[in-house]
């Protein structure tokens, strides 16, 4: 019976030491990879990087060239009054005077021709070449009236009048029409026709009895008079008709005047990083003066003021000479934003290292809980075998019945330990899932498993002589320390800018321009042809202006306050940098010292574990020959279980310290650089040396 119990015990040991299957064994590298891809803290750090990138772009936008287009349209309507009303009344009265005068002149010529014995012979033909008429007195006003074209488009000539000044715009003193001089059949210029010439010719009538030559001369004069009279009659009637037609086209006197002012400016603005501003612009302006209810044609009663088009090319320069001048002041915001962006990227890398450290700590706890649960499961299996062996021995009356109670108590204790270990295993799985960012995937969390701790226990330690080198390497590679250095750099830039901006504001502004002008009655304000004519025609320039602006704030509290804030922020950043550097050195030295201590403790526990295994093997041999009892064997097995659990705990601590040293020296994720994408990093193999 003792031999059968010993056989059961040996079979129980073999069964308990068999490796239990795991649904998913996640490597440490895979755990870190998922952490970098899904951890919310890393995502938050990347969001802060994106925010800093936005601030950097915003600060860079201060120097972006900008295109601008400013347009303005003003339309005003007002009652016609003053000089404009007077001029429009004058236009109409002048045409009425022309009509009245030439109507009367035509009647006079008609009567003159009717009084004489004039035949129908014709010697002369009129010439339509225009001729200006002078001869107004010094106190008279010469008025030139263009009669325009008739309905068929024929030019109606120009009327010249000499007016005496009066309240009703004057009375006609003399008048002429520019239809040209009279030319005889041989091409001789006989001079312009006038009523005075008719009177002179009339003097020679009825003188044929004095001399035959006078009679011949009389006949020639009569012929000439006949020709000139008929032509003069035709001309005067045409002029009168043209004046009436022109007056009819003008229509009634307008009541309202419309003014249009259209302005547009287009150009670009440039601000250079030394503070100088450059603004080239093209300014276009068009003005119109029209009368309400009139066609936009002068001959039909519209305003005689031409549409005015102006094109101006302007170049403006601003030179800051005091505050906000020089690269140190103007570019400070951009440079500080870039430094803060690089700091945010370094902090994102550091956050990836931080979260990887937390993941690996949870990973080692899961590995330890997993191996502890497996060990307690093996122990429970052995105790169940021993309990069955005790039951068989009691049944064979080889052990007293009280031994069954002691054995059952040991089994119950083993069950309780295993239950607690399994609870710790589930807790470790949840902690790892939370660190990785997959806590919502419940089925997967329940199947998480870790690698064995044994390969990591074999990693070498660092001796005390390597501590100084490890500290230097940590200070050279730590991303958070690099981020602090960039924060210090950003605050130094802002402090220097604030110090320079204590100066008063002094700005020198210079502008140079060329302009062109075009007057037109045909092009409206919206016609680009008018602007093109103004720009491509004769230009005038250069016109230039110089301005000096000076501003001295009383007290200058705003600038002084910014300087104090910048100095305070710089002091805080420098303190944080020094403090972090000190903590890194302390943490590295403590981790190396703890690693050496835990290594010695691990070796001691491994030695104790080996001794306990040998003792248990000897106990089974003694149990076979009956030299010890089953209870003695059970006690020895319990000691082996506790030694194994102790070794597992030491192995977990050793793996965590190996991870801690790599974290402190920023070699946990390899050599990522301070601006690497955290999601692209990989766990550095633990087989690679730290130094």
Image: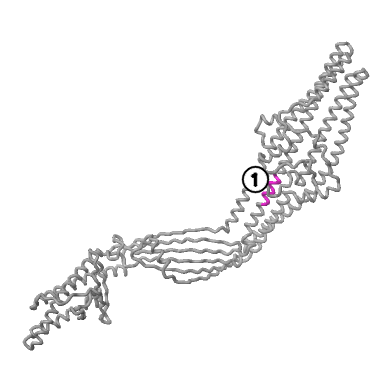
Residue 664: name its quadrant: top right
- Residue under label 1, please give it: 46
Residue 515: name its quadrant: bottom left
Q: Provide residue 148's location: percent of width, then percent of height.
A: 26, 68
Of the 4 image quadrants, the one containing the N terminus is top right
Identify the residue at the far top of this view: 396
Please, what secondary structure does the residue beneath circle 1 have?
Answer: helix
- From the viewer's perspective, is residue 62 above or below residue 34? below
Report the side of 10 relative to 500 (left or right): right
Front residue of this view, candidates 150 and 380? 150
- Whether residue 583 appears in this view of the structure is no
Q: Badge 1: few (under 14), some or many (20 or more) residues near its Cα, within 10 Å?
A: many
Q: Provide residue 659's location: percent of width, then percent of height.
A: 77, 41
Q: Does the magenta stretch include residue 348?
A: yes
Dominant secondary structure of the residues highlighted in magenta in the image: helix
- From the viewer's perspective, is residue 228 above or below residue 689? below
- From the viewer's perspective, is residue 343 above or below residue 190? above
Report the side of 10 relative to 40 (left or right): right
Front residue of this view, candidates 17 and 401? 17
Q: Provide residue 523's location: percent of width, then percent of height.
A: 35, 63
Identify the residue at the far front of this view: 186
- From the viewer's perspective, is residue 55 above or below residue 660? below
Identify the residue at the far right of this view: 627
Is the image coloured rainbow, by chain, by secondary structure, or in one colour? one colour
Q: What stretch is highlighted in magenta?
A: 342-351
Q: Is residue 129 magenta?
A: no
């Amino acid at each position: 019976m003792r031999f059968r119990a010993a056989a059961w015990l040996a079979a129980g040991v073999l069964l308990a030491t068999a490796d239990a299957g795991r649904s998913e064994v996640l490597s440490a590298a895979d755990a870190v990879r998922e952490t970098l891809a899904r951890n919310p803290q890393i995502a938050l750090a990347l969001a802060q990087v994106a925010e800093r990138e936005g601030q950097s772009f915003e600060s860079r936008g201060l120097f972006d060239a900008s295109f601008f287009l400013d347009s303005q349209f003003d339309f005003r309507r007002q009652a016609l009054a003053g000089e404009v009303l007077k001029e429009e009344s004058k236009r109409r009265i002048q045409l009425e005077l022309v009509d009245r005068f030439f109507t009367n002149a035509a009647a006079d010529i008609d009567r003159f021709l009717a009084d004489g014995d004039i035949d129908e012979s014709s010697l002369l033909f009129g010439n339509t070449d225009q001729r200006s008429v002078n001869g107004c007195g010094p106190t008279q006003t010469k008025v030139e009236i263009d009669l325009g074209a008739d309905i068929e488009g024929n030019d109606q000539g120009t009327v010249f009048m000499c007016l005496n000044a009066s309240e009703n715009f004057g009375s006609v003193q003399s008048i002429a029409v520019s239809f040209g001089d009279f030319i005889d059949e041989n091409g001789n210029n006989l001079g312009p026709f006038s009523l005075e010439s008719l009177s002179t010719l009339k003097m020679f009538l009825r003188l044929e009895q004095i001399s035959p030559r006078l009679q011949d001369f009389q006949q020639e004069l009569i012929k000439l008079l006949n020709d000139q009279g008929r032509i003069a009659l035709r001309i005067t009637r045409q002029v009168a008709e043209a004046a009436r037609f022109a007056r009819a086209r003008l229509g009634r006197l307008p009541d309202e005047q419309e003014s249009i002012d259209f302005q547009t400016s287009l150009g670009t603005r440039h601000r250079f990083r030394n503070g100088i501003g450059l603004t080239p612009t093209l300014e276009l302006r068009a003005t119109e003066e029209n009368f309400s209810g009139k066609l936009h044609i002068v001959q039909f009663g519209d305003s005689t003021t031409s549409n005015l088009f102006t094109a101006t090319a302007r170049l403006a320069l601003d030179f800051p000479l005091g505050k906000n001048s020089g690269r140190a002041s103007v570019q400070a915001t951009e440079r500080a934003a870039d430094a803060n962006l690089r700091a945010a990227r370094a902090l994102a890398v550091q956050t990836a290292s931080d979260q990887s450290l937390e993941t690996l700590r949870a990973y080692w706890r899961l590995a330890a809980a997993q191996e502890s649960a497996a060990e307690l499961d093996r122990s429970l299996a052995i105790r169940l075998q021993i309990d069955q062996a005790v039951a068989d021995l009691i049944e064979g009356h080889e052990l007293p019945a009280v031994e069954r109670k002691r054995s059952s108590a040991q089994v119950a204790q083993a069950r309780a330990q295993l239950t607690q270990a399994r609870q710790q295993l589930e807790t470790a799985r949840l902690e790892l899932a939370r660190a990785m960012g997959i806590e919502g995937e419940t089925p997967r969390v329940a199947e998480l498993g870790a690698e064995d701790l044994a390969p990591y226990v074999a990693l070498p330690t660092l001796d005390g002589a390597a501590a100084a080198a490890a500290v230097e390497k940590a200070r050279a590679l730590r991303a958070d320390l690099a981020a602090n250095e960039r924060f210090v750099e950003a605050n130094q830039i802002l402090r220097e800018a604030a110090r320079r901006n204590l100066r008063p504001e002094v700005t020198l502004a210079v502008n140079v321009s060329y302009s062109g002008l075009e007057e037109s009655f045909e092009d409206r304000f919206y016609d680009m042809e008018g602007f093109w004519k103004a720009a491509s025609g004769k230009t005038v320039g250069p016109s230039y202006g110089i301005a000096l602006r000076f501003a001295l704030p009383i007290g200058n509290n705003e600038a002084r306050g910014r300087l104090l804030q910048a100095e305070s922020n710089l002091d805080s950043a420098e303190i944080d940098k020094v403090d972090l550097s000190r903590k890194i050195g302390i943490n590295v030295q403590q981790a190396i010292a703890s690693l050496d201590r835990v290594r010695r403790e691990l070796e001691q526990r491994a030695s104790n574990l080996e001794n306990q295994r040998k003792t248990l093997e000897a106990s089974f041999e003694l149990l076979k020959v009956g030299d010890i009892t089953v209870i003695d064997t059970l006690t020895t097995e319990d000691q082996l279980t506790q030694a194994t659990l102790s070794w597992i705990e030491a192995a977990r601590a050793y793996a965590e310290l190996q991870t801690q040293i790599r974290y402190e020296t920023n070699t946990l994720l390899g050599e990522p650089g301070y601006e690497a994408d955290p999601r692209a990093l990989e766990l550095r193999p633990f087989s690679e040396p730290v130094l």
